[in-house]
Image (spheres, rainbow, N blue to C red):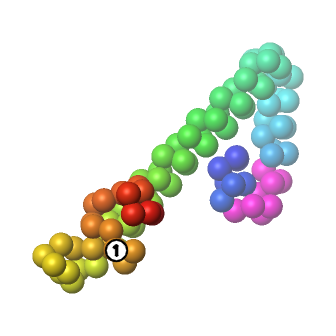
Amino acid sequence: MTILAFVYGPLVLGGYLLVGLLGWSRVTVRDHTVPQVVGGSVLGAAAAFLAYAVIARLVVLAVGLLRCDRSRQGGVRRLQGGRRCGEGGRTAHGP
């Protein structure tokens, strides 16, 4: 639910109610304790956030490589910002 709320905003905040009800039901039927439910929720949210961050970074890198200017300037393909294709991060001359 955390990733959905991060991406779609308030449209999915009602889903948190469902997550709470699910956790409550697991405690009520004595399948889990309260600390297990809370811990599982926190670990699940952290894992989802980490996975989203990694995937978002990979998408940004892929889009950057796809946006390479195909025209050759001095025999080197360059991005729109002047950097060489495949060159990332900051350089001595700025971003």
For the record, the magenta segment spans 8-15
Farthest-out residue, bottom? 71
x, y percent for residue 76? 18, 72
Q: Is residue 9 magenta?
A: yes
Kind of element beneath mark 1: loop
x, y percent for residue 85? 27, 66
Is the magenta region chiefly helix, strand or loop?
helix
Residue drawn at the location 38% of the way across and 57% of the way down: 92
Left or right: 44, with 90 as reference point: right
Residue 60, picture quadrant: bottom left
Q: Is residue 7 magenta?
A: no
Farthest-out residue, left? 75
x, y percent for residue 56? 50, 55
Residue drawn at the location 67% of the way across and 37% of the way down: 45
Judge whether 43 appears above or below 87 on screen: above
What amino acid is at disc 1?
Gly
Q: Residues within 10 Å of mark 1 (few under 14, many from 20)?
A: few
Residue drawn at the location 83% of the way across and 37% of the way down: 20
Judge whether 35 appears above or below 3 on screen: above
Residue 11, picture quadrant: bottom right
Quadrant occupied by the C terminus: bottom left
Q: Nearer the viewer, residue 48 or 78?
A: 78
Residue holding disc 1? 82
Residue drawn at the location 47% of the way across and 53% of the way down: 57
Residue 38, picture quadrant: top right
Q: Nearer the viewer, residue 44 or 74?
A: 74
x, y percent for residue 53? 54, 47
Left or right: 76, with 79 as reference point: left
